[in-house]
Amino acid sequence: MLDGEKNWIDRFARHLEFERRLSPLTSKSYRRDLELFYQWSTGSGIERWRDIDSEHVRSFAASCYRKGLSARSIQRQLSALRTFFRFLVREKQLKKHPVQAIRPPKAGKRLPGNLDADRMARLLDLPGNSPIVTRDRAILELLYSSGLRLSELTGLNLGDVDIADATVRVTGKGNKERILPVGRLALAALKSWYQMRATIADAAEQAVFVSGRGGRISTRSVQARVEYWAKRQGIDVRVYPHLLRHSFATHLLESSHDLRGVQELLGHANIATTQVYTHLDFQHLAQIYDQTHPRARLKDKPRTPAK
């Protein structure tokens, strides 16, 4: 490809940064994907952006697949090309969009991870009774007990927790409120934290969870504390706050099989979002089938001898 054509990648990067106000990291990701396509185009003897058609883009995607790139990576590259070519059409460098009719490859649905019951119990068994440890124990217990999102946890105010009723009111996505039950151990952890909270919280602070400086704890601080305790407790997988929400949903579904109920507790607007948690053990499902399905139970009934 002609050297002058590469300048359009620089212009596009400036467009992303200054007009669309994307983060430098996102702009860098776009540039990386476009430069890969530029190198492929140069190797294929293409001289100008206007010479590229949909077949060229398909060939590029196929070459990426042969190199072992995942469907998600190819999806990302095609998304970068789509945005870039839309920019070139706007700048009158192209008359038509060569990626418009191309469907990206389907990526396999990524199942959320979760901690099994034994590892979860080990994570929650924090040693010590200092104010910070007591706070962290309450944070971990509440994340797992009620399936809170990280932002919901850090946004909690004192008036949102009803100790007597064992419930917590949270504001989720779309500014929607929901009231969630708080488990026995989480409630006990919260009570212990409330007894120590005044020793570090600012007098006027309404946040349930505060940092060592006395103000509302940040999401980043909670992430750091969860990572710290996972390593301290010897958990052999990466642990982050949302993993406790995943574990809450998975364990609840494994016990109740009530998809609608778990949807309500998680605050999902669409039940399809909740369905990713239905990766139950097949053997367990087979046992339920054998025990409950009428046709499965026929084999246990004595057959009537033929007359």
Image (tube, helix red, strand yellow):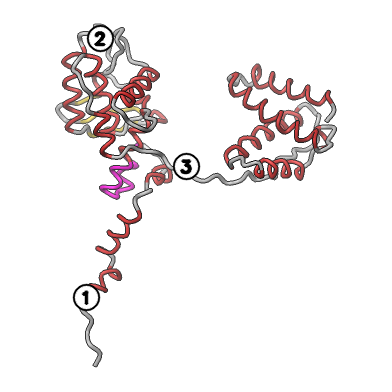
x, y (%) of residue 259?
Answer: 33, 47
Residue type for callout 1 = Lys
Judge by depth and name the residue closer to the eye, 227 or 262: 227
Q: Residues within 10 Å of mark 3 (few under 14, many from 20)?
A: few
The Cα atoms of the two marked residues, 2 and 3, are separated by 40 Å
Between discs 1 and 3, the one toward the N terminus: 3
Q: Quadrant of residue 50?
A: top right
Residue type for callout 3 = Arg
Checking the image for residue 110, the label placed there is 3
253 over 207 or under it: above or below: below
Looking at this rendering, what residue extends furthest in the left direction? 164
Judge by depth and name the residue closer to the eye, 11 or 125: 125
Circle 1 — which element?
loop
The Cα atoms of the two marked residues, 1 and 3, are separated by 42 Å
Query: Magenta segment, principal secondary structure?
Result: helix
Checking the image for residue 301, the label placed there is 1
x, y (%) of residue 255?
Answer: 26, 47
What residue would you read off at disc 2? Answer: 201
Between discs 2 and 3, the one toward the N terminus: 3
